[in-house]
Amino acid sequence: MTSSRRAKVLSWLLGLDLIGESVLIEGYEVDVEGVKKWIRENEVKRVLVQAPPGLRGVRRKLIDEISGELDMVFVHGGGCWGGCDLAVAHAKAVGADAIIHLGHARFLEKSPIPTFYLECRKTDPAPILAALEKSAKILQGHHKIGVGVTIQWQDSLSPVRKKLEEYGVEALTGPPIPPLRYESQVLGCGYEPLLRLSEEVECYLIVGSKFHGLGLALQTEKTVYSLDPELQRLDDLSAEVEKLLRSRYGYIEMFRRADEVGVVVSVKPGQYRMGAAVKLRETLRKAGKRAEILIMDDVEVNLLRDSGFEGFVNMACPRLSIEDQQALDKPLLLPMEALIAVGAAEWGEVIRTPRYFLMEV
Amino acid sequence: MTSSRRAKVLSWLLGLDLIGESVLIEGYEVDVEGVKKWIRENEVKRVLVQAPPGLRGVRRKLIDEISGELDMVFVHGGGCWGGCDLAVAHAKAVGADAIIHLGHARFLEKSPIPTFYLECRKTDPAPILAALEKSAKILQGHHKIGVGVTIQWQDSLSPVRKKLEEYGVEALTGPPIPPLRYESQVLGCGYEPLLRLSEEVECYLIVGSKFHGLGLALQTEKTVYSLDPELQRLDDLSAEVEKLLRSRYGYIEMFRRADEVGVVVSVKPGQYRMGAAVKLRETLRKAGKRAEILIMDDVEVNLLRDSGFEGFVNMACPRLSIEDQQALDKPLLLPMEALIAVGAAEWGEVIRTPRYFLMEV
């Protein structure tokens, strides 16, 4: 029996639908055959499987499918917040010889351990089209919109473009620029292809979630709309980004008054920015602060709160400063915000520009 | 200038008191000279400093003292919950060549990376003696008490013994048994020397905190008193342990009904119990559960809650099952409790015996 035929029989036995070589699990197209082939070709024996919260069901079915080919399958119990968040240290610690990382497109060109980025794409664009239809009026005033999609909606880019054309709106997309792999793909921290369209478009539409829209809205003065197919919502993020920026300014002020601060470096291979952190520590010390480099894996608010520092600069994932700040009563600044705090950059020149998320100093 | 003399001058400059070769920082005797000597002898260049929450001030002063001898000092921003909790993976990830671990006695005989366990002992037994005096009546009915102390109160063992003798109470102590390094030293998970006194003593007194007393009370039917010098409290833990055990039984019942469970293995070198976890996974599978091994570093309740499993067996630090359970709405069982859940051990034969905390199956 060929591996493809075996896959078909297995899929049928497990109640999975087949799409070419991929199978459909909970509405996601998943290249299980590709994983198996990779396991065999790389002679993988012990694998660590990493999956974000929304893909627990996919993880379970994947494990059912591949367990027979492996000596050991471990489930990673830590975070999985992006393709940058590879559990390399954990994999090495348990003697795994490879990682299967679900839900994100390849992020690291070279991983320190063989890694299969298993994309999980939604096959049905209906929720997007329905949400667009409900909110057509909002978009109909525009002629040219820059459209971005998260990886799970990548295959819906064409239907979205067509739908917008029905409303007389031209959808502009950006070419892939590493670490982004696909046309108009966006990450919570990566919007470069869309930002380059800035001169041509009137506004942006990000298909994914408010989270993904907000990341762009902090880096551009154009209006950003987010379309969340799960929640069936299309939102103009302008008010939210203004409110957020006022709050950020308050945290910068708080950081200014802090004496002892930590520059947080995560050991996650895609977030490890030691060079910039060491430079920033020097800048902060010259500005009179007692600054140390703080090493973490997951940057946990509880650990920060308890660490004895009065403020932090986050050199790990920029979104931590945006999403986790509310849960912490101490500032958790972006590198650029820290430079603003010590007078080395200007607030007005940084916000709503691509520099705002720059993880370098 | 000799290193000892230089230390004296430095200490004087920094406003620290010298006790022999050690310095007094915030009431703790700290062997700063020992650290420096070790740094030189091992040609340490890049060090990761790990400290528990109570020792942030000591950490800061230590860094001031040693920075001049090193190319790079990193502060560890993760947990530091015991001598078992060595940040080896983080140290390796940032290219540190050694760890300085504050506040715990040496736990690992051989660490995968050179590690200095820097004990921080309280020099003044006054808070203990004052608390004992306040609560003398509670103890005076007893003739023989087994006494345990946490490492920071190690030097107070003699004054405690004398004080008890004043009340006509004989204090029995246990010899060090690895991983315990000192007479009558206790850890949150380690009480073997005291448990061996079981036939001879009427009850136990643990100097440290309720946390430390409770760990013993779960493993013996004798009354355990905890004495907390900071809070100036002496408590009989009998009622608390009974209440706790009733709640544990409830979680065992909940686990019994769970279909999909995770056996949690931490990558922390002193908590890594993969062999036992693999055996337990088999036992659980034979009992009809879908069991997977879940790899974590810090075992975070948020991550467990979000992991897609209905219940957990904790193969990391036994105290997680006791201290963190309340924050989680799913059972986080000890290995022995999991065996009880599947009928491979008896509740009544395990609780309040040394088997209860056994991290083997």
Image (cartoon, coloured by chain):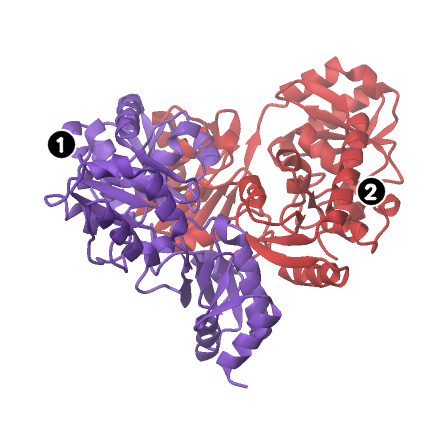
Chain colours: A purple, B red
Q: In this view, does B64 lie to the left or right of A39?
A: left
Residue A68, given in percent of the width and then of the height, sits at 60, 73
Residue that extends furthest to the front in the rendered view of this protein? A166
Residue at the disc numbered 1: A349
Q: Can residue A218 be seen in this view?
A: no
- Of residues B356 and B7, the one drawn nearer to the viewer in this rendering: B356
Residue at the disc numbered 2: B351
Amino acid, disc 1: Glu
Answer above or below: position of B233 versus B304: above
Residue B161, given in percent of the width and then of the height, sits at 75, 28
Q: Is residue B9 left or right of residue A170?
A: right
Answer above or below: position of B68 versus A269: above
Q: Which chain carries label 2?
A: B
Answer above or below: position of B169 versus A32: above
Dot 2, crowdedness within 10 Å: few (<14), some or many (≥20)? some
Dot 1, crowdedness within 10 Å: few (<14), some or many (≥20)? few
